Amino acid sequence: TRKIIIAIDGPAASGKSTTARLLARKLGYTYIDTGAMYRSVTLKAFEAGLLGHLQDHPDDATSLLEGIDIAFEAERVLLDGKDVTEAIRDNRVSRHVSFVSSLKPVRDTLKQMQRAMGEKRGVVMDGRDIGTVVFPDAELKIFLVADASERAKRRYTELVRKSGGSNNVPSIKELEQEILQRDRSDAERTHAPLKKHQDAVEVDTSGLTIDEQVALVYNLALEKT
Ligand code: C5P
């Protein structure tokens, strides 16, 4: 069987990363979470105190990007050698990531890194623009969607689990608003907006269990390998 590229795009919290990770495991492929890369750059901007400055000087993002090292190792995310797996999921990163992702220098740099990571094929890559911009030649393109209320519930459960309780976790309603706001920003931006590629297979995960959505995409992948 040949090794292919599987691009999984879709709005926030639609089940992309869970599906992509399990699918990659089943196929023996590498999983690349491009959202984690945009989140890492956002965290770096935060830590450098540059977020406000970038609003008026987007080109200065190049100083953050110079020599940046983002690596995936044993399902951990390493930013400049430091484990940021948990830090990039923080809700304050989620609130600013769409802004940082809209900056052209950020997109150009991460696109090059992603193409290099997938060049040997045998990868499952998830994000917003993988099928449309990063790998338009991906053999299988999936566009994953789910109802906003379902997505907010999933994100809430995930945050509660990760923080060991509902303290400091926004309400489901607030999360739904944030998710919809992020989708709007991602879909309306100038560079590489979120949209379904004409060849992408749309999968609605609203009523599906994780096993069901993985099985569905796995079968589509087998047809292509
Ligand atoms: O996938 P996740 O929700 O973690 O992505 C976080 C954010 O990163 C998205 O809301 C979007 O702004 C940005 N992103 C992007 N292009 C990608 C992946 C993520 O702009 N390929």
Image: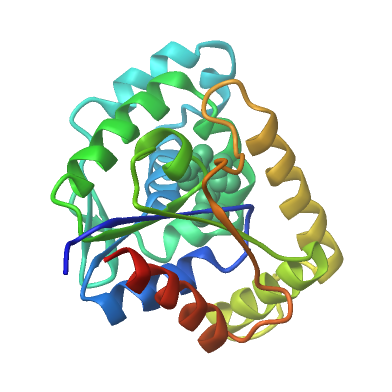
| Number of marks in picture | 0
Which is more toward the observer, 84 or 30? 30
Residue at image coords 51%, 88%: 211
Q: Is residue 91 above or below residue 40?
A: below
Q: Is residue 169 above or below residue 78?
A: below
Which is more toward the observer, 201 or 32? 201
Residue 76 lies, in percent from the top left, at 28, 67
Q: Quadrant of residue 154?
A: bottom right
Residue at image coords 51%, 78%: 216
Decide if residue 50 is on the left or right side of residue 153: left
Decide if residue 132 is on the left or right side of residue 24: right
Residue 45 lies, in percent from the top left, at 43, 34
Q: Is residue 118 above or below residue 31?
A: above
Residue 64 lies, in percent from the top left, at 32, 27
Which is more toward the observer, 54 or 7? 7
Which is more toward the observer, 157 or 200? 200
Decide if residue 159 is on the left or right side of residue 77: right
Residue 23 lies, in percent from the top left, at 37, 75
